[in-house]
Amino acid sequence: MIDGEDMTSLNAKQLQVKRRKIGMIFQHFNLLSSSTVAENIAFPLKLAGTSQAEISARIKELLELVGLQEHADKYPSQLSGGQKQRVGIARALANHPDILLCDEATSALDPQTTNAILALLLDINRKLGITILLITHEMQVIRAICDRVAVMEKGLIVETGKVLDVFLQPQHPVTKEFVGQVSDFAASSTAIDSNTKQGIMAGTVIRITYIGAKTYEPILFETVKSTNVTFAILQGTISSMKGVPYGQLVVQLSGAQHEEIAAVIAKLKQEGMDVEVMAP
């Protein structure tokens, strides 16, 4: 889900009683093949009994919003997949919906076109303050633009939360499987476990998660520099989600007694780090 002004200003009870107007974006566009781009956008407005003058003004406004000003008189067969989905987005916005529901809206598109459509949805969210609800199995889509996520299995919600929290600290096995699709750390966990069992890797292996400004601070170095603990970086990454930086380090702590290593881990947690012991 991408939050909008409309949703964040209402509590759960208000949402239950207020009638919601929903615009729908489909995976395979569902455009009227015998109608032009302008006519496809006008279709829901005509059903709503909107005047022709209002329809013409709204079509012009929406064509500009989705970047199809020069394609108003073309038919769907003359458009690319990305252009067809832009028409679908414009049609979904025609009647000023409160919520934009996207059902696998990028699954039929190539990666470059997917990025362009996601950028358009973010632009719509910022300009219109509309909440966008995405149904997708593409975790990279969620990571790129969503604020919150709900993971479902067999029709039931098994985990919810802010995207950053769910991606960095997945709790349910299904969530861990999904997140593993876009994370290098799933493979590293298996390799570390295997090497530890074979005696190839000694010491305590931990995964440290940084979020926000702490991502760029030398917290690990400052924590161990006055101790007998040494560390080796096994894997690391820095990225961001919707402008929020985050980082993860897999490190091997060694060169000291177990108690001193435990004290280092405790100190890292006191500094606000999320620390997971991967191997003793």
Image: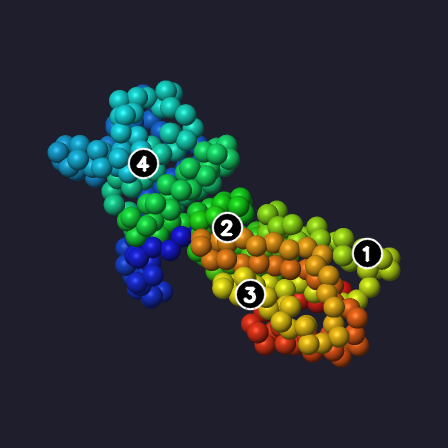
Query: Which residue has dot 1 on it?
Result: 195
Residue 178 horizontal side relative to residue 13, left or right:
right
- Neighbor class of circle 1 (other Cα within 10 Å; few <14, some 14-19, many 20+) is some
Residue visible at 30% across and 57% down in the picture:
5
| Tag 1–tag 2 contact (CB < 8 Å) | no
Query: Which residue has dot 4 on it?
Result: 66
The label nearer to you, 4 versus 1, is 1
Please identify the residue farthest to the front as the structure is shown. 226
- Neighbor class of circle 3 (other Cα within 10 Å; few <14, some 14-19, many 20+) is few
> Marks 3 and 4, Cα distance to the nearest angstrom?
41 Å
Which amino acid type is shown beneath numbered disc 2? Answer: Arg
Tell me the quarter of the picture where residue 224 sits: bottom right
Which amino acid type is shown beneath numbered disc 4? Answer: Val
Question: On screen, 48 above or below 251?
Answer: above
Query: Which residue has dot 3 on it?
Result: 217
Which amino acid type is shown beneath numbered disc 1? Answer: Asn
The label nearer to you, 2 versus 3, is 3
Say if residue 156 shows up in the picture.
no
Query: Which residue has dot 2 on it?
Result: 143
**Earlier sequence position, callout 4 versus callout 2:** 4
**Earlier sequence position, callout 3 versus callout 4:** 4
> Marks 4 and 2, Cα distance to the nearest angstrom?
23 Å
> Marks 3 and 1, Cα distance to the nearest angstrom?
30 Å
Secondary structure found at label 1: helix
| Tag 3–tag 1 contact (CB < 8 Å) | no
- Neighbor class of circle 4 (other Cα within 10 Å; few <14, some 14-19, many 20+) is many
**Earlier sequence position, callout 1 versus callout 2:** 2
The label nearer to you, 1 versus 2, is 1
Question: On screen, 246 above or below 90?
Answer: below
Tell me the quarter of the picture where residue 91 sits: top left
